[in-house]
Amino acid sequence: MWYQLVNESEVDSPALLFYKDRIERNIEQMITMINGEAERLMVHVKTNKTPEIVQMLLAAGIQKFKCATIAEAEMIAMAGGRYIVLAHQLVGPKVNRLIELRKLYPTIFIASLLDDKINAVFHNEIFKQHDLTGHIFIDINNGMNRSGHPVNEKLLELYQFIHNQSNLQLYGLHVYDGHLRDADFTIRKEEIDIGFVEINDFIIKIEQAGLPAPVVIAGGTPAFTTHAGRVEVVCSPGTCVLWDWGYGDQLQEQPFEHAALMLTRVISKPAPGIVTIDLGHKAVAAENPIDKRIRFLNLKNYELLSQSEEHGVLQVNNWENIKIGDVLYGLPYHVCPTVNLYEEAQVVEDGRVTGAWQVVGRKRRITV
């Protein structure tokens, strides 16, 4: 069993395990899928949140990174990343925090997103006050309806408006089509390609208006297989560095390996057919229904009945054979918020935990 630890008795539970060799192979696979063009990858760090994995990506030739929070951006900078896109439209005090981060790392490219004229004016004034130029991508809503400006007749007006701001430098478009995730790759690809037609049309309008050709950041992990073949875009997958049960089942055309597991132990056998483990909803992402949270690799014929903060209750068929203290290895359905629950990940090399990596990016604030 590839996942079983030689020294599992030394590992407290519940624990987050990172299998380093598998992470390395997943990084290699990402580069292979994009025909070796590592410069076209902008890996989203919201999944791993660790400086060590950022450094592994840098060592593999990946130089661009995307993140969701200012703390994640600072974590990338601390790890040596020099090109960062903060994939949010910042409001309120976060704009000042971005300014402080820029001052702390003056030689690093750190961009953020805008989709609104009023917020663009707000950004421009703050950057002007600090004698800085804000690096900007316009966030595009091409159907997900979560953020971004729709592709309509007002989008070019917004593009020109931001381009003309004295202390903002507009670099291009951020197009996240995360709503397109059909398990059938043929259907998913067709939907992604159809959705990208209007983006290509808009790029032509930008150039016809005499504006510089935009950099286009496209997709996440579900769209990676499709956008990897679109040589004019930068791709920003993230989950595939660690992979999980959800995408592993859903995106079967992507050949990534599961590189993050949870280690848990049986702590009680309160009734015949029932065992309790020390993996509650504080230890694995619980935003999905109870049957889509954790899949155990070394246990068959079970059902996760319930979770509380520190307990998980399982119904099992081989109750008599299970002992208090038995170790179970579980694959999270959604690895990104699961990693966020842990202060550190136990690093596995050659079947043995050899150390721990701090999950630095889970913090709301590091120094800025």
Image: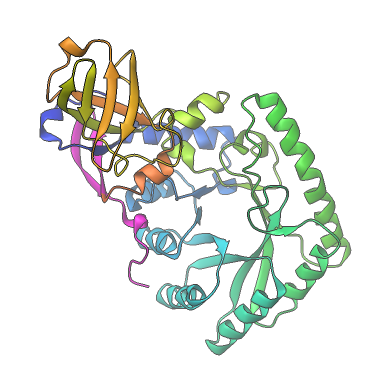
What residue sits 63% from the left and 53% below the top?
146
What residue sits 39% from the left and 40% below the top?
286
Query: Is 316 left or right of 201, judged from the image as shown?
Result: left
Query: Is 328 left or right of 140, judged from the image as shown?
Result: left
- Residue 78 quadrant: bottom left
Residue 202 appears in the figure: yes
Query: Is 89 left or right of 353, judged from the image as shown?
Result: right
Q: Position of residue 335 (x, y in %)?
A: 41, 39
Q: Position of residue 366 (x, y in %)?
A: 33, 66
Q: Position of residue 230 (x, y in %)?
A: 70, 40
Q: Position of residue 245 (x, y in %)?
A: 44, 29
Determine whether 208 is above or below 13 in the image.
below
Magenta stretch: includes residue 366: yes
Q: Which residues are magenta?
A: 344-368
What residue sits 42% from the left and 72% below the top?
105
Magenta stretch: includes residue 201: no
Determine whether 126 is above or below 184 in the image.
below
